[in-house]
Amino acid sequence: MIIEPKIRGFICTTAHPVGCATNVQRQIDHVVVKGPVPSGFKRVLVLGCSTGYGLASRIVTTFGSGADTVGVSFERPPAEGKTASAGWYNNRAFEQRAKAAGRVAVTVEGDAFSNAIKAEAIEAVRTNLGQVDLIVYSVASPVRTDPVDGMTYRSAIKPYGSAVTSKTLNTGTGEVSEIAVEPATEEEAASTVKVMGGEDWELWIAALSEAGVLADGFQSLNYTYLGSELTWPIYHKGTLGKAKADLDRAAAAIRARFGAHAAHVVALKAVVTQASSAIPVVPLYGTLLIKVMDEMGIGEGTIEQIDRLFRVKLQGDIALDEDGRVRVDDWELSGIVQAELKKRWAALTTESLPALADLPKYRQEFLKLFGFGLGGVDYSADVDPQVVPAN
């Protein structure tokens, strides 16, 4: 079939197997060209391994540090006349390339929140790695069913306490407008914490510990985004902020039980993801950030961020902020970048957007998540949606 992007709102419902494999290979190439990454992490479990920062972590540890990995992600396989999810293609492209490089790469696909998938992943670790030195938690989901009470919780990305009015962007039309977002209820805030807070991270560590598959001196990382003052009203000071605070609580609890380096929250920069595209205000900020950081020569995507995390930030005595977090959002939140962003934000209109921000690159980065818009891929070719091309 000829596969084209089908975008509905903030979702692309198709993915291109050749494009996804090409995107995975280019991330691998980025790491390999930069050379080996010194690391003691040789047995790695990545939760949320198929896209974005999770996929990048699997690539950097495998192709930079020679690690063997087990990954967990929730995917949609291909069906008659329908493509798989991008992550389904990414997982298989990664596995092919990792195994060709002589590394162990096993992927468990299913609901990472469930006890059944925890058990399956633990058995995969025991069988293929023995134990794990590093756990990367990069699960992004709007919904979580609690394995203890059986309740299904849904996150609500809203302000907390009072309504917020701000600028926002329709990424389809390029229109900049004002948006008013009503505050979350207490129930919505609590549900957001249940979905996006640290509880499941703690459950994973506890399950791995009980199964005896945590190596002595293991470390775990949980990825988060704190953001700029420009997005704080809808993000850091909203329901998401409450969830992020719960990550800090969970990290402290894990460290108290397992040691000072057992758990760290890692604050990363804003990048284009399907999840972030659905948050009011954030896509507009993202188009500005791309333009400003590229102009300053410090633009980073997911693979560049995670490469810098492992290659620089996790070497030697790890520098932490006052809350015990590792900061890789330092370039984004630097004074010079934020000053330029604030100046441009004040001047943003539909008419000024092309000069001040980079919506075309934002759209391109969004399509790349699903294997589209990559140079060197023949998108007019007839492809089998059930086949991921080898290297």
Image (tube, helix red, strand yellow):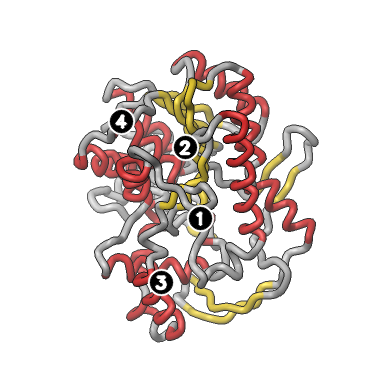
Instruction: Tell me the residue at 25%/64% (across/down).
Output: 297
> Which circle's residue, 2 or 4, is located before the other in the chain?
2
Q: Which residue in the protein does label 3 denote? A: 338
CA distance for labels 4 and 3:
34 Å
Q: Amino acid at mark 3?
A: Gln
Contact? badges 1 and 2 (CB < 8 Å): no
Which is nearer the eye, 295 or 232?
A: 232
Mark 2 touches mark 4? (CB < 8 Å): no
In front: 387, or 98? 98
User: Dot 1: few (<14), some (14–19), or many (≥20) neighbours within 10 Å?
Assistant: many
Q: Is residue 242 left or right of residue 389?
A: right
Name the residue beneath numbered marker 2: 49
Is residue 324 at all visible to an observer of this figure? yes
**Residue 145 in which image quadrant:** top right
Residue 166 relative to residue 5: left or right: right
Disc 1 element: loop
- Give the distance between the C-alpha atoms of the residues marked 2 and 4, in whole angstroms: 17 Å
Query: Which residue lies under the disc numbered 4?
Result: 65
Say which residue appears at 32% left-offset and 66% top-offset.
293
